[in-house]
Structures are given as C-alpha cells and as structure tokens.
Amino acid sequence: MVFRLKVFILLSALFIGLNANAQVETRHKAIKDMLTELKVRCEKNSELKAYFEAYKAALEQKNYTLALDQIDKAILKAPDLTVLYELRGSVKSIVGDFSGAMSDYDYVIAKAPNYVTYYNRGTTKTDNGDLKGALADYDKSVTLEPNYPRLYNNRASVKLALNDKAGADADYKKALSLSPENKAIKDNISIANNTSGGTIIQTGIKKDEVVQISDTDALNEKMALYDAFLKLHPNTTEVYFYRAEVRKELGNTKGAISDYSVVISYRPNNSEAFMLRADLNYELGNYTSAIDDYSTVIRVRPTNAIAYNSRGLTYYTLKNNVSAKEDFNKAIEIDPEFSEAYINRAKIAETNEDFEEALKDYEKALELNKKNQVLTTKVTELKQRIAKRREEVNFYTQYLTYKPTEAKPYFDRGMAYKQLREYSSALMDFNTAIKLDTTLTAAYLARSDVKEYMKDTDGMIADLLIYLRKNPNDANAILKIAKAYDKNENTQAAIAQYTKLITIKATEANYYLLRAAAYDKSKNYTAAITDYTKYISMRPDEVEAQINLAVAKRKNKDYAGAVATLNSLLGANANNAEAYYERARINAGYLSKREAACEDYKKAMDLGHAAAKVMYEDECK
C-alpha cells in the first residue's frame, strides 16, 4: 500500500502547533516558514483569509472542484505564497490532474524544498508510472526527515515494483521499527512476502496509460493481489481503480463498473471514474446510465470535449440526433481540432442526407488527419454523391419538360435540391408535387424539414400534422411539433403532443420530463409534480429533476414536501449548491426559519452559488 499524505491535514496540524507556540524541529523549518507567512498574510488580508477558509471547508465536504477554485483565487491574491501551491498540488493529485500537481510541487521545491513536497511529488510520480522519479523523491524526503515511517513504507513499495526486493525489505523493517504497532505496514510486509514480485503499485490510472498485459495468468495474479489487499484495506480508493482496469482486461466489464462505482462513492467529483464507468456502460448497451455519467463529467468538468463527444455518440446510438448534434457542436466549440467530433457530426448530416454539410465536416476532419485513407475515401465518395445529385437535378429537369404533370419527379428533384442545401428550389418542387398529388405524404414530411431550415415554424407544424394523419405513431414528428409549440409558448398544445408521445411509448422517461416542464410553465403544478415524480422513479439519480420537483412543490405551496425532497437529495449529494439555495429560500420565505435558511445560504455560497452569496450578505449578516 502506498500511503497518501493528506497534506492539508498535516499542514493544519502544524498550523495549530504554531498557534500554540510549539517548538518545531529544524528539519521542519521550511514548512514552519511557509505556514507562518500564510498565517501573517491571512491576518492582514481578509479576502485571502476568506478564500483559504472556503478552500478548507470545500475539502471537508470533498468538493474538490470548489476547493481548486478557492485556492486559485487565493493564489491570485498572493501569488508569492509558496504554501498555496503545495495545497493546490495536493488537490490536483486527488482529482487525477497529475501534470498540474507536478507543476505545483516543482514550484514549491524550487522555492522552499521540504520533505512533505518531495513526499507528495513522489506519490504523484508513482501514480503516473514514473517509479524511478518517485524513488529519487522518496530518497530526498528520507534525507530531510529520517524518522517518518510512511516514507519508508512508500519507498519500499516502489523498490518492490523495481524488483529491488532487498531494498524493499530493508525499508519495510525500518518503517516497522519506527511504528511497531502499525497494522498497515505489517500487512504490506505480509503481502510483499506472499507475492512473486507483485506490488500494489501500478503505472497510473489514466485511461490511455494503463499497462496492457496480454498474459491471462499475470492478470489473474494481479487480481488475486488486489483482492487480498482490499480485504485488509477496503477503503483504499486507488486499488479499486487498478483492479477495475485488470477486470476490464479480463473481460469482466460488470466487475470493472462495480469497482469504479466504489471509487465514485469515495470521490463523488472524480470525473475520470465517471468517464470510465460511462464508457463501459456504453459498451454494455446501458445507454441511459452512460448518458447520466457523461453528464456528471460535464458538470464537474464543463470544458471536457471528450465527454460531450461521447455523450453525443450515445444519443446518436439512441437515434436522438437533435441532442447528439448539440453535443458534437459543443465538443467542437471547446476543441476546434477534435477530428472525431467532426466525423460524428458528419454522420448525422449523412443520416439526414445533408451531403454538403457532411462533406464540410469530413473535409475538416481530413485536414486534421491528412494521411487518413478512410477519410480520404469518404470525402471522395461524398463528392461523387453530390455530383450525382446534380445529375439527378439535371435529369429530372429534362424529364419534366416532357412530363410536367407528374408529382413524383418534382418530389425527387426536391429531395436532390434539399440534399444540396438549395432550400428555395426544394420548397418550390415540394409545393408543386403536393399540388399535383395531395396524398404524397413523404412530400409533406420533406417540406416540413425545408420549412424548419427556413425558420418557418408554423409552416413546419402544419406539414407535420398532415403527415401524421397517415403516420400517427411517428414519435420524431410528434416530438418536433411539441418542441416547436413549446418554443412558441403554445404550452397547452405542447402538452397535448407530449401526452401523445407518452401514449405511444410510456417507457421513455424524457417524455415525462418534457411534459412536466410544460405543465410547470402553464402553472399546473400538481400535474408537473406527478410527471417529475414519474421521471425520477425512472431516473433516480437525476439531480436537476429532483430540484425541479422541489420547486414545483414550493410553487404549489407544499413547503414541507419541497423540503423533504431537498433533504433526500442532499442526503445522497451533499455538495449540491442549488439544493441548499432552494431549501434556504423555502425556510426563509415560507417557514420562518431564518437560522436554518442562513446556514443553507452559507453552504450554497461556499459551494460557489452566486445568488446565495448575495442573499447571505443581505439577510444573514
């Protein structure tokens, strides 16, 4: 087992010692100097102190995103305070930002070398697979602090991974001599003695950097080691991460998902664990679970282009092309050189037979991957298709000079124009086709698409309603109408369409959510509550819907019910700022519980909620 030195706890303890005028040994001088300076600066700068206190509060709640935000702000206020970089590095290491952690530790060591930072940099290098670099840092740390058992324990683990069994034995013995009753060290010695060169050390937990092992026997040996270790130390998060990777290699996808779930239970903001679990759920066809996990990654890391792309691909697999395209657009906005997102967006355009748009995206992807033969072939193929559409236009134009009263050729030429994005010409041909044959249902559907492109929403709805007379169960057409009504504030008409969708497919959770929002908008809160409740029963981990349910209950004057919903949500997700804020509003405005409201405003404010900060400062100070 590699011990993680929770640097913020260690430094806090030393800070208490400083406040009590404790004697700090010479070897701790660098740490003492850093902490003394932090204390003095906080006393002089209330804003710096506020950021530091908010950072500590966020750590206690394991809200690492907020902790990083607050320590970043503290650094902006005092960029010369070395200890702030140490604290930031420790949190970056926790969330898996190894390069960021390394950068901060390098800075501290350059300014004020000390055993704590060497120790932390050593554990980070271990996580990132740099075992020799980790060993060098542990050596330096031991030189500065020769009586700290955890240093010897960690160095022993690294030596074992580097096949220095004698060196590992010596370090384990030294660690045990310094801490004779330490059960964890004894267990590590036992595990080391019962494995043939095995160790808990892995070469990192990044998705693309995990060691690839083809030998099944070697994988099974690692599994046995991890299983044995977790029996002794069931709370060691990193080992679940490592075991998940081995389980994945062995084809035990469900077991890997289970291990990532354990990691998430300990680290609810660990975006990498959510991402890896989402990928595996996608592989198993658990698309709803995959979308939920990708959405969590996006909430924690809103600039993660890969998460948007992966969620978009999941929507595309579910034939939800509207949501898929939105996600691919966002991925490209974040990373304009993300070739895979261009390819995926091009596939949607192809599905819609929008070959000009597809060609544009494929050409951009090819520009980013100039030697990709598959993309080269695809671009050539699309150009040929577009040329063929031109030929079709010419053919039907010539044909119609001889047969000007046939509806089908106008429809076919209109489709060719539509695929070439020549919408005015397409609209004229669809109009003529419908005039000649009012039963040509496909022409109404195609014309609705053109009218949508041309921003004629009323015309689009009219055509879709005619199309639905012969195709009453086309969910995509009904959904288009419902969303158009919703956008145009024709809420009752939208509700009627959402109800049709639920009649067609009562197992589709999103239909209940959409109707709930429409009921909410129309102030029919009782109906909204029913639909939100139904949606949550189908998607129990969907946080935003639970907040919407609480808001609907508040609007319906069921204040106790609203608070109960928020209590349940916060019991499962203690870092949700919006839930604290909403509960505070209810306690303050309707239940006359000012003290409870102020506590919730404070919690929401500490989690970064801007409106809560205003309310706390106005109402509670």
Image (tube, rainbow, N blue to C red):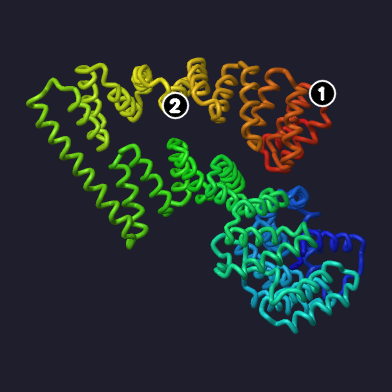
What is the number of the mark on residue 592?
A: 1
Q: Looking at the picture, how far across and down is residue 25, in whole percent?
A: 87, 74
Q: What's the residue at 11%, 22% (across, down)?
A: 404
Q: Residues within 10 Å of mark 1 (few under 14, many from 20)?
A: few
User: Is residue 531 found left or right of 120 in the rendered image?
Assistant: left
What is the number of the mark on residue 148?
A: none
Q: Indicate the quadrant where residue 553 lies.
A: top right
What is the number of the mark on residue 475?
A: 2
- Which residue is the extreme one toward the front? 217
The answer to whether residue 324 shows anywhere in this view is yes
Q: What's the residue at 73%, 82% (across, down)?
A: 165
Q: Secondary structure at mark 2?
A: helix
Q: Quadrant of the N terminus?
A: bottom right
- Which residue is the extreme one toward the left? 402
Above/below status of 10 relative to 111: above
Q: What's the residue at 34%, 60% (across, down)?
A: 372
Above/below status of 591 relative to 339: above
Q: Secondary structure at mark 1?
A: loop
Q: What's the residue at 21%, 47% (across, down)?
A: 384
User: Is residue 48 found left or right of 447 in the rendered image?
Assistant: right
Q: Looking at the picture, how far across and down is residue 434, in whole percent?
A: 24, 19
Q: Looking at the picture, how far across and down is residue 589, in whole percent?
A: 75, 23
- Please name the amino acid that badge 2 sits on: Ala
Q: Quadrant of the C terminus?
A: top right
- Please name the amino acid that badge 1 sits on: Ser
Q: Residues within 10 Å of mark 2 (few under 14, many from 20)?
A: some
Q: Indicate the quadrant where residue 559 lies.
A: top right
User: Is residue 309 found left or right of 146 in the rendered image?
Assistant: left
- Which residue is the extreme one toward the bottom? 166
